[in-house]
Image: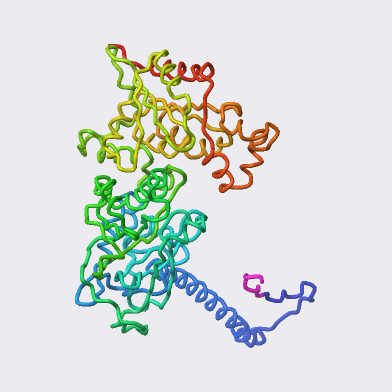
Amino acid sequence: MDSKPPLLHRPKPPSSLPSVAISSRERDVLKPRRAVRLFPLLLMTIYAAYCILRIVSSLSSSSSSSSSSAFPHPLQATNSRVVVHERTWDVRSSLQTHIISSPKETSLRARQEGPPPASVSCSALINGDASAAMDWAVLCCDRSHFRTDVCYMRGRVATVPRSLSIVVDGRRLPRQEETIRPYTRKWEASVMRTIDVLKLVAQPSEDDGGGGNATGASPRCDVRHEVPAVVFSTGGYTGNVYHEFSDGLLPLYATAGRFGGEVVLVVLEYHPWWVAKYGTLVRLISNYEMVDLARDKRVHCFPEMIVGLRIHGELTIDPRLMPTGKGIRDFQDLLAQGFGRSRRKDQQLPPTPLLPAITSSRKSKLVILVRSRSRVLQNLRQVIKASQAVGFDVQLLNPKKCTPMPDLYDSLHAADAVLAVHGAALTHLLFMRPAAVLIQIVPLGLGWPAEEFYGQPARAAGLDYMEYKVLPEESSLWRHYDRRDPVIADPAAITRRGWPEIKKVYLDHQNVRVNIRRFRMVLASAYSHVTRTQPRL
């Protein structure tokens, strides 16, 4: 439909009328008639001006209204302080405390208004990108990512441990329910079924005087927190070091890091061994004691909460997706503070890669990560001798679940090169110094996971990454399958069947015996890199 108003046309006087002489008396009679004809035109002009003024006024009013309301259910549009259950919760000041300062934020604070409703996404609230002046209770979920769901709650947020529920209430907040499994492998149905389901409930305040109807009593707070909370699960594949970092610690840092420690971590499926193993690291992410959601029967109340974790990919942090702009090198700073020998918070990795810590008085150090079940390096002794022959001082390391993380960190951080067959232990590449060498032996059929899980993260961490791709005759599968079998002749045909088939054939039932003559060339290249970067003393 054409939005333009119809044009008003005045009839043109005929141009061919004959001229007629008019007497003065007749002229006096015509003057009032002309005034009568001009009067409607004057009225239409005034009306048009009035319409224009109303349009301008309407646009200005709607802009002001939309900028002061980010959600259709405000708690109190003119007052940022909301009294809930014996306690005044200052939502505005809470959010301002925990949103990272930036020029953009300064602009929003100066205006003291939020964006219009259509422009505020749940993702923006989770990332802390929304205006700090927004004063409305919220329950929303971002389910757009194939790896994870993340929900956001703000208002009076209370845990209800007995029912694994979390309740948020606020004035005029409509009743709403969401469910979420706060684990970062959303696409993998089998493991997600093992994760406990949390029920998230939004409801109006009991003292709602603005037209809302309270449909359930809000739990009374036993513990009140002045800072936000992040809820996550340590279930699933926790127990495998790769998943502990890629699915857990890195997403936790990506989600909670923006709060600068002023956040409470609420853990679902809490494991004491996990806390013992990673407690020093977790205490650098949060300044507060963790809450065991299932076992702590007290009701904890928060001003806002993020349920679930952001994940950027395999063993990585993408600074473009971080509210703070931080990346994997910043996470390595955290590892140095938590696990490094000095354990000093002021000891951080420099912004440029370090040269390997080699002096002319000692040999370059090669750490070999040893496997004992599958993907075993069957001619390890020959590999050790070849490594020593090219100039390396060799150290064997067999990480166990109970190995203290500081011990692993110190060994790998001191290494000039690390060698391992594809497996979870390669996760410890995050402990290595930038510019050190990582050599991955890639078994038959595992080219894609080797590159995706460890090759790309190694380069992002500033390592000099090398790989040795096993030939069919170097794999133990060579002795168990016919040479024309797709397992040997066409591994891609097997890997196209999916991860379960990859795991069954190539991960769980394959060992390797490298060709020493061919492998020595990789060792020599690694040693050459180390010695080229050796400082001249």
Q: Is residue 186 above or below residue 319?
A: below
| Residue at the spot 25% in from the left edge and 57% down from the top edge | 290
Residue 236 sits in quarter: bottom left
| Residue at the spot 42% in from the left edge and 27% down from the top edge | 419
Q: Is residue 205 left or right of residue 438?
A: left
Q: Please, which colouring scheme is shown?
A: rainbow
Q: Quadrant of the C terminus?
A: top left
**Residue 175 screen position, x and y as percent:** 41, 78
Magenta stretch: helix, strand or loop mostly: loop
Please say whether residue 69 is one of the residues in the magenta stretch. no
Considering depth in this image, is 438 or 420 the residue closer to the camera? 420
Q: Is residue 267 left or right of residue 444?
A: left
**Residue 58 screen position, x and y as percent:** 46, 73
Q: Is residue 68 above or below residue 40?
A: above
**What's the magenta region?**
1-8
**Residue 322 screen position, x and y as percent:** 39, 48
Please say whether residue 4 is one of the residues in the magenta stretch. yes
How many numbered callouts?
Answer: 0
Considering depth in this image, is 393 or 184 the residue closer to the camera? 393
Q: Quadrant of the N terminus?
A: bottom right
Which residue is the extreme one toward the front? 480
**Residue 414 screen position, x and y as percent:** 30, 26
| Residue at the spot 52% in from the left edge and 24% down from the top edge | 514
Q: Is residue 148 left or right of residue 128?
A: right
